[in-house]
Image (tube, rainbow, N blue to C red):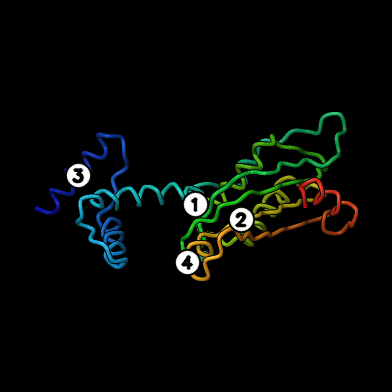
Amino acid sequence: MAHDHLHDEDDDDLARGKEPVPHDVQEAIRTLIRWSGDDPAREGLLDTPKRVARAWKEYCQGYGEDPSAHLARQFEEVGGYNELVLLKDIPFQSHCEHHMAPIVGKAAIAYLPRHKVVGISKLARVLHAYARRLQIQERLTSEVAQCIWDALKPHGVAVVIEAQHGCMTGRGVRTPGVGMVTSRLIGTFLEDNRSRKEVLSLMGY
Ligand SMILES: [Zn+2]
């Protein structure tokens, strides 16, 4: 009986073009609502388990992506351009692996090409592929830098991420407005003082 009911529900979801949400996933979210102090059977919360489940599929889309695939299409440098390439103020959202709370911020990504360049929007795609997972900011920063370093073999890579953590602003010590800055510098940006100063000042740091 319960099984038939679930089956009909799945058919309804499919008919509306939505992915069915497994029963145990919905039940887990109902358990969390109950644990938080509310009644999952309350009318306003009836569809919440499905919505939350689908939202989390989206927040964690990155697990289904190979970030380096975004850098597969590379172009030879045109006209011997060997100055740094910088994309800054890239907004992103992630979730911290300790509380599953939102991390909201912006990133600056730069590299100094050796032979190859990529379409500039691809740098943002690499960021999002790593950000749409459960993360800590330090690892997100170094994963983005390492991916570009490995794929493009440039002279240098610099990634700076500035973000606010929901687990700090919304709970615990509750310090709204406090941002955390992390950076990862590789190659010439790490080794050469002048290059490092140049890239960080272009990024606004
Ligand atoms: Zn946290």
In this rendering, position of residue 31 left or right of residue 142: left
| Residue at disc 1, secondary structure | helix
In this rendering, position of residue 28 left or right of residue 138: left
Residue hosting label 3: 9
Q: Is residue 77 placed above or below 21 in the rendered structure?
A: above
Q: CA distance from mark 1 to mark 4?
A: 27 Å
Q: Is residue 180 placed above or below 53 in the rendered structure?
A: below
Q: CA distance from mark 2 to mark 1?
A: 21 Å
What is the x, y in percent for residue 101? 47, 60
Q: CA distance from mark 2 to mark 4?
A: 16 Å
| Residue at disc 2, secondary structure | strand
Residue hosting label 4: 171
Q: Is disc 3 surrounded by few (<14), some (14 to 19) or many (20+) residues within 10 Å?
A: some
Q: CA distance from mark 3 to mark 4?
A: 36 Å
Residue hosting label 1: 63
Residue drawn at the location 68% of the way across and 60% of the way down? 182
Q: CA distance from mark 3 to mark 1?
A: 27 Å
Front residue of this view, candidates 32 and 8: 32
In this rendering, position of residue 42 left or right of residue 138: left
Q: Quadrant of residue 90?
A: top right
Front residue of this view, candidates 173 and 62: 173
